[in-house]
């Protein structure tokens, strides 16, 4: 794989982009990281993802792959010599895809309600958010990881949202640990994996980014 | 596979449910079809899909699989002896997943605008809908199927929407063929595959269903 040229078009606070960074790190794939300015997207981004024009895009030997979960699955299939992310059993694979899809359908939108709204809307958002986390906690059960004994596809899909937990908690004025202690233990377990921890952005940097974005919204 | 017990919980006009029927038909899998009353869902549906409580659900030897594209991929992995739906090359697999996901994100919601709204909203919906179909037509290009020489994953994902084309056209007062003649040729090619044609609901039945639903909405 020495001749592989891998480029990632990304934006540092994105939980979707971070999934790709985590997957590449876990697999030990070297790549060139290119930060995108989303208010002035590069020609390469627009050409590589003409349909959605969104990050992340993985460009592998000149061929672009788009949509974070599809990229993670692609990485798992191409670099299949170590750290399998999806299980080999078809039923377990379907279950992993189901929960990753659930995270995709729920977490971002509901999380946004928690940190960008106020009053009753925010309270409703927090309730819904905690409900989603509880469903995920129930799915985790007593396993160390969503993937069972090892860090897998659903773990990749969800762990990047943990970098936003501090922001949700601070701007939403609540404690996730109080509602979902086992999920926070799972986050801590994931952070003990060096490759995972290194690929994730510091929660304080996410908080700074979120505050700057709120200020910008308020000024408009 | 003689001992396999396969049950499908479904609702006949659903383009998502029909995907599973098409995939099972193409693979030659025998199954028990159970029609759901969505206003009074069965205990089995609620227990089998407690997160979304939606059809389709495939129950294979007592184990439920949910979400149509995930079910189709599961069927492709379990009954892998004939008619492969996803290509074997990782890059082509990622491309197929991308387009199936695009169809999921766009077609249902925008199609709904076409047949349930009026006036300017409907005109905007039609324009958006034709734009989506044109993107799909461009992706099809000169290939006989989205899967290349044979009917594949993206073909399964999209063909079930063709049963609604007559409804979109009649209630939206426009012609899809006029805008996307190559896509209509693709529909005709798919309909020449006996297993596919037999698994799809007659466009007239869909139209009757849509009219009944419109009447019900108007009465409320």
Image: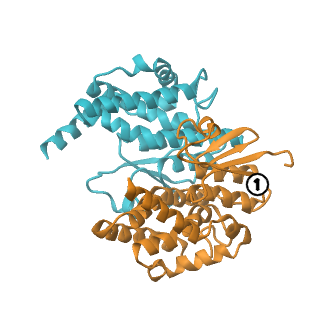
Chain colours: A cyan, B orange
Q: Quadrant of residue B170?
A: bottom left
Residue hosting label 1 = B80
- Badge 1: how crowded within 10 Å, few (<14), some, or many (20+)? few
For the question of whether residue B67 can be seen, the reply is yes
Direction from residue A94 to residue A214 in the image, left or right: left
Element marked by disc 1: loop
For the question of whether residue A205 can be seen, the reply is no
**Is residue B38 positioned above or below A145 on the image?**
below
Which residue ends up furthest to the right in the rendered image?
Answer: B2
- In-front residue for pair A183/A57: A183
- In-front residue for pair A51/B90: A51
- In-front residue for pair B25/B38: B38
Q: How many marks?
A: 1
Which residue ends up furthest to the front in the rendered image?
Answer: B219
Direction from residue A22 to residue B62 in the image, left or right: right
Which residue ends up furthest to the left in the rendered image?
Answer: A219
On the image, the x and y values in percent for residue A145 come to 58, 27
Residue at (44% x, 64% y) in the render:
B111
- Disc 1 chain ID: B
Residue at (19% x, 43% y) in the render:
A217
On the image, the x and y values in percent for residue B54 come to 55, 45
Residue at (62% x, 40% y) in the render:
B42
On the image, the x and y values in percent for residue A17 come to 42, 44
On the image, the x and y values in percent for residue A4 come to 56, 53
């Amino acid at each position: 794989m020495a001749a592989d040229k891998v480029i990632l078009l990304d934006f540092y606070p994105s939980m979707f982009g971070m999934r790709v960074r985590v997957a590449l790190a876990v697999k030990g794939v070297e790549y060139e990281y290119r930060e995108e300015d989303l208010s002035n997207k590069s020609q390469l981004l627009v050409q590589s993802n003409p349909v959605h024009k969104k990050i992340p895009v993985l460009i592998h030997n000149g061929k672009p792959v788009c949509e974070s979960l599809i990229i993670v699955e692609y990485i798992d299939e191409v670099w299949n010599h170590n750290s399998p992310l999806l299980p080999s059993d078809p039923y377990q694979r379907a279950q992993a895809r189901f929960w990753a899809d659930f995270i995709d359908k729920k977490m971002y939108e509901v999380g946004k309600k928690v940190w960008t709204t106020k009053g009753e809307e925010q309270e409703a958002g927090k309730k819904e958010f905690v409900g989603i986390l509880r469903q995920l906690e129930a799915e985790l059960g007593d396993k160390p990881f969503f993937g069972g004994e090892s860090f897998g596809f659903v773990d990749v899909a969800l762990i990047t949202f943990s970098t936003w937990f501090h922001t949700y908690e601070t701007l939403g004025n609540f404690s996730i640990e109080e509602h979902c202690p086992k999920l926070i233990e799972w986050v801590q377990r994931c952070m003990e994996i060096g490759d995972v921890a290194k690929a994730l952005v510091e929660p304080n940097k996410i908080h700074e980014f979120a505050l700057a974005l709120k200020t910008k919204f308020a000024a408009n």
